[in-house]
Amino acid sequence: MPKEKFGSEKVIKIKKDGPYVVCGNIPMAKQTIITDEDGVSVRWEKGEEYPRMEQYSLCRCGNSENKPFCDSMHIHTGFRDDE
Ligand code: FES
């Protein structure tokens, strides 16, 4: 995805028919839902951290082969916001 210019501002922008664009050197890590013996969610557990980047795009269509990042597959699958 081409990078957009937002300066050093912390911004999450929703691209029409595309990914979330996250800007501002915001940290990101995997999170796992921890459940009790009945399967009820009780807390999140922080996992692996991703390398920090000034800007990244997160898949919103579910079709990326490089999740959680967008690999532009939304273009090929015809992902639409309004469906
Ligand atoms: S939003 Fe781009 S691959 Fe899913």
Image: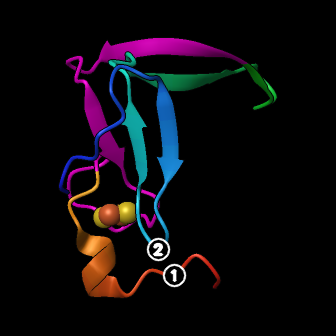
Color scheme of the displayed model? rainbow
Q: Quadrant of the N terminus?
A: bottom left
Q: Are marks 1 and 2 in contact (CB under 8 Å)?
A: yes
Distance, label 1 to label 2, CA atoms, is 5 Å
Q: Who's the residue at 23% across and 67% down the image? A: 72
Q: Would you place residue 48 above or below residue 23 in this image?
A: above
Q: Quadrant of the C terminus?
A: bottom right
- Residue 45 pos. (x, y %): 54, 12
CB at disc 2 and ligand 1 closer than 8 Å: no
Q: Which residue is mark 1?
A: 80
- Residue 15 pos. (x, y %): 46, 61
- Under mark 2, the amino acid is Asp
CB at disc 1 and ligand 1 closer than 8 Å: no
Q: Who's the residue at 39% across and 15% down the image? A: 47
Q: Which residue is mark 2?
A: 17
Magenta region: which residues?
43-69
Q: Earlier in the sequence, mark 1 or mark 2?
A: 2
Q: Quadrant of ligand 1?
A: bottom left
Question: Is residue 68 shown to the viewer in this render?
Answer: no
Q: Is residue 70 covered in magenta?
A: no
Residue 8 placement, left or right of 79: left
